[in-house]
Amino acid sequence: MNGAQALIATLSDCGVDVCFANPGTSEMQLVAALDEQPGMQAILGLFEGVVTGAADGYGRMTDKPAATLLHLGPGLGNGLANLHNARRACTPVVNIVGDHATDHLQYDAPLTSDIVGVARPMSDWIRTSTSPDDLAAAGAEAAAAALSYPGQVATLIAPADHAWTDGAQPAHPLRGTDVPRADAQTVEEAAAALRQNGSAVFLGGRALRADALQQAGRIAAATGARLICETFTARLQRGAGRVTVERLPYFGEMAAEFLEGLSSLVFVGAEPPVSFFAYPGRPSWLSPEGATLVKLAGARQDAVHALRALADALDAPDKPARVQETVLPPIGTGSLDAQSIGAVLAKLMPDGAIVSDEAATAGLAIFPMTQGARQHDWLMLTGGSIGQGLPLSVGAAIACPDRKVIALQADGSAMYTVQALWTMAREDLDVTTVIINNGSYAILNVELARVGVTNPGAKALSLLDLTRPAIDWVSVSEGMGVPAVKADTVEGFQDALGEALSARGPRVVEAVIPAGV
Amino acid sequence: MNGAQALIATLSDCGVDVCFANPGTSEMQLVAALDEQPGMQAILGLFEGVVTGAADGYGRMTDKPAATLLHLGPGLGNGLANLHNARRACTPVVNIVGDHATDHLQYDAPLTSDIVGVARPMSDWIRTSTSPDDLAAAGAEAAAAALSYPGQVATLIAPADHAWTDGAQPAHPLRGTDVPRADAQTVEEAAAALRQNGSAVFLGGRALRADALQQAGRIAAATGARLICETFTARLQRGAGRVTVERLPYFGEMAAEFLEGLSSLVFVGAEPPVSFFAYPGRPSWLSPEGATLVKLAGARQDAVHALRALADALDAPDKPARVQETVLPPIGTGSLDAQSIGAVLAKLMPDGAIVSDEAATAGLAIFPMTQGARQHDWLMLTGGSIGQGLPLSVGAAIACPDRKVIALQADGSAMYTVQALWTMAREDLDVTTVIINNGSYAILNVELARVGVTNPGAKALSLLDLTRPAIDWVSVSEGMGVPAVKADTVEGFQDALGEALSARGPRVVEAVIPAGV
C-alpha cells in the first residue's frame, strides 16, 4: 500500500466520506487511491473556490469534515477565500494539498511555492507529511484537528513522493477531546445579568441550532430577555414551531440603535458584536455603553450545555417562549422586488429546506419574510468573502440529498464561483438557485456614500455596475448544464420557483429586480 | 487631498495608467480617487483572478506595471494564482490591497485576516502604509519595486483610514536602479564554452524579445550553437523574419533527449532547465551529465547587453543566423484537431498578433505550426497555474489596443477565470478566444499514467472528465456578452476564425476536437 492509499483509508476510517477535488499532476496518486475506497465519494469542482466552499457547506450540515483535494500553492490560493468563510463559520474541513516530490523542491520548478505560507492565514491547523509512512498519521491528526468543537480548518500538505511510495499503513483514528464547558461561576454571573430589566442573550455559532434555541427560549420565558443572533450565522435553524431570534442589523448605526437601551448582554457562541466595516467618525464597537457584558460561552465552548445550565440556574420552565408561529406574508403582483421574492419563497419553500443566503442587499430584505415559513436551515456568508453561496449549496446538497437546497444568490457574488453550477449539473444536485439580478454591486453603491463619497463620477460608478453588458444568467446556466428560466414579475417568479422546487435536480431562476435594489 | 487621492496621483506620476479593479467597501475611497485622475483607466474584473492576470498581460506587453485594486485578504487570495504566474514571468505589477481602518483591526471583524501573510508567498515586495501621509510614499516605492528589471510583483496594503484621511500629498517618483550586467569574465567563459562543438544558448525571460534574439542569432552565426528557449516563456517574439529558437519539450524525458549530446550550455535570462513535475524514478535535472554550464545572465540581469557582449566577444557577424522563413503548413479538411487548428491559425493570424497560449496539450501541437507565420508575440503559462490565459488576453488587449489578441484556451483551464469574457465584452476588447474543447483535463490523463497509475477506475477518470455535462461554450460566452460560434471541422473552424479575426471586438470560437487530444 502506498502513502496515498494509506491516507485515504485513514481518512475513511476517521469518518470522512466525501472528497471535493480539483487535482493536478502532483495529486494523481491520491486520485487513484480514491478509486479504491468505495466509501469515499469524489466530487469534481472546476475551480478550487467551488471545492472549498462545498466542503464548508457539507461540514455545516453534517458537523463532520469533508476532504478537499487541491493542487499545490496556487490551487490552495484559489480556495482561500472560501476557507476564510469556513474558518469564520468554525466548519470542520480537511484540506489535502499536494506538493512536489521532496527531492524536486530544490529545483524551484515553475509551480513551486511556499504552500505552508499560503495555508497559514486561513487554516487553524497545518502540517506537512514528513515521510511516506507519516502521511496517514498526519491525516488522522488532520481529521481530529478538524473535528475540534465546533470545527476547524485543517490543512495537510502531501508531497507527491510520500503519496507514491509503497510500504505505508493506515493510521488509527484519534480520540476527540472533550468539548470545553462554561464554568458554574460564569453561569451564575450570566443568570444575575439576565435578571436585570432590558437584558438580551446574544447567540452565534452552535447556539443557533434548534436544540440550543430551545434552551434559549426557556431563558426568555424565565427572564423576558431578548434573543438576538449575530448578523451572519453559519447555520440558523428557524421557521414555524422553532424558538425565534432577532437578527442584528448589518449597518453599524442600525445595529447600535437596535441594541440601544439594553442593560446586560450574555454571549453564547459569539463575541460582542462589532461593525462589519469601519466608517469615518463612527464607532466599531456596538454594545451599549455601560451595559453588563457576560461571555458565558465562546464559539469553542459547548453551546447547548451553557444555555441549559443557564436556564436551569434561572429555574426556567421547560416550555420555551418566543416560539415562532406560521406567518406567510401576502404576495403582491406586478414587478418583482426583494420583499416579493421573500414572500413567494416563504409560501413555497418545503419543510426541511436548506437556504444558502448570499443575496447581499436583497438577502437582508428576504430574511425576515421567511421567519414564519416551514422549518428550515439558513446558511449565511460568515466571513464576508463573496463567492460562497453556490459552492455552499453544492456541499449542503451532497450532505443532505433528501432535502431541497435553495441558493439565494446576488448576481455580482454569483460570478465569483459560477463554476459551481456545473457541479450541480454533474451530480444532479437538488438545488434551486435564485439569481437575484439587479445589475450592480448594489451594496457598494450604498457603501460608497457611507465612507463619504458623495458625488461619484462615471468611472467610479462603472466599477459598481453590472449592466454593460448585462449578464444573461439563463444562458450562462444552461451553458453549464443547469436548466434556467428568467422572471421579472411576481407572478412569473412564483410560477418559475414553484416549478423549480417541485422538480428534482438543479434549476436556476433568474429573478430580475430594479437596478440598485 | 486625502491619502487615496495622493496615492493615485503618485502612481499616475510614476507612469501607472491602468488600474484593474475588483474593489469592496474598504477600497471605496480609492475608487473615488480613480475618478479624479483622468490619466488612469479603471477596468472592472468580476473576479480577482481576472484582475491579477490582466495586470500580468498588461505588464508583459508594456514592461511597466498596471495597478490592481483588491479587497482585503480574501480578495488578494482570489488573485494569488495569477500573481504566482506573474511573478514567474517577472512581470511588473503593483497590487493595492485595501485593509480595514487601523483602529478597526483590533475587533477582528468577519473580513479581517493576515493580509501580509496572504501576500507573502506570491509577492517580491510587500509594504503596509503606516499613516495617511505615508500611503503615497509607499505607492512610489511600490512602483519602483515593480519596475526593478525585468519586473516584480509589489504589494501595497492600504488601510481604509489612511485612504480617507485628509492632509496627504503626492510623493515623488523614485529613480530606478541600473540593470545589473554580466561581467566580462563570465562573457569570456561563455564564449569559450560556445567554441566547443555541440553547444547551445539557452534563453528565457527578456532574452526572448526580438532585440535580444537578434544578438542570439549573431552568436549562432559565429558558433553554430543551437538556440533553445525555456518551455514556458513570458513573451516570445517570433514569426517570419525573426531569429527563431527551438522550444524545450514539456515532458522531462523528451526534454532530456532533446538536450542529449550537448557539451556546453550558456544561459541567458533562464536557469538550467528542470522537469515541470517529478515522476517516480526519473530525474528532475535535465542538462546532460558532464556538460559545461555557464550562467551568463540570470533573469534579473540585462539580457540584451549579455548577448551583445557575448556576440562581440565571439567576433560574430552583424547578420544573424536562424532567421525564420515564412512557412504556412498545409491545411487539411474534415474533423478538427490541434494540428489543423495550428495550420489555420498560422494562415490567418495578422501581423503583430499577440497570442495568449493556455491551450495545454493542444498548445504543444499548435506552437510549432505557427513558427513561420507573420510576426507575433507568444505569451505562455509561466507559473503553471491554470486560469491565466483569458485574463492575460484582457491585459494584453488593454496594453495594445491596435493589435489583435488571440487567446488559445483549453476548455478545462478556461473555466477557472471564465469571468474574463465579461470584461472583454465591457471594454470591447479586440480579443478572439479559441476555446479548444476536448471535454477533459487531457493533460491529466497523460500524467496519471506517468506517475504510475496504470489502471484507473471510474471514479478517478471522472475527476478528469468534462463531458458530464458537456460545457456549451457558445452559451456561456454569449451569456457574458461575447458573440460565439462553434466549429468541429477544419472548414468550419477556418470560416469561424477568419470571421472573428476580421471583425473588431471580442469573439469566441469553440473548437471541438476529439476527447483526450
Image (cartoon, coloured by chain):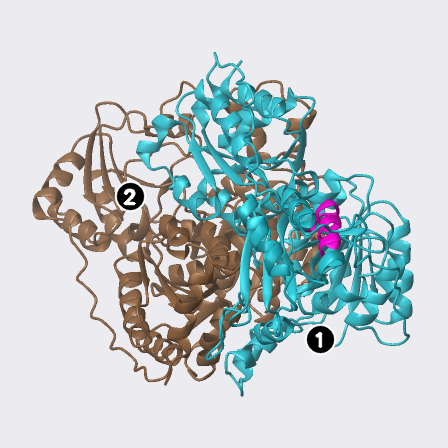
Chain colours: A brown, B cyan
| Chain bearing mark 2 | A
Identity, as a three-letter code, of the amino acid under mark 2: Ala
Q: CA distance from mark 2 to mark 1?
A: 53 Å
Q: Nearer the viewer, residue B127 or B281?
A: B281
User: On the rendered structure, is B217 left or right of B469?
Assistant: right
The residue that disc 2 covers is A270
| Relative height, residue B3 to residue A322 (above, below) | above
Counting from the top left corner in percent of width and height, residue A163 is at: 40, 75
Q: Residue at x 54, y 54 (%)?
A: B295
Kindly identify the residue that appears in the image at 54 percent across and 61 percent down.
Answer: B293
Chain of the residue under the numbered disc 1 shown in the image: B
Could you tell me which residue is drawn at 17 percent across and 62 percent down? A178
Magenta span has B299?
Answer: no
Numbered circle sitting on residue A122: none
Is B218 included in the stretch rendered in magenta? yes
Q: Note whether B436 is above or below B377 in the view shown.
A: below
For label 1, the crowd category at 10 Å Cα-Cα, with few meaning under 14, some 14 to 19 and many 20 or more, is: some
Q: Nearer the viewer, residue A372 or B422?
A: B422
- For the point 77% across and 73% down, the residue is B513
Q: Is residue B26 left or right of residue B347?
A: left
The magenta-colored residue range is: B208-219
- The 10 Å Cα crowd at callout 2, few under 14, some 14 to 19, many 20 or more, is many
At label 1, which amino acid type do we have? Val
Type of secondary structure dominating the magenta stretch: helix
Q: What x and y, as percent, mark residue B270?
A: 58, 54
Badge nearest the viewer, 2 or 1? 1
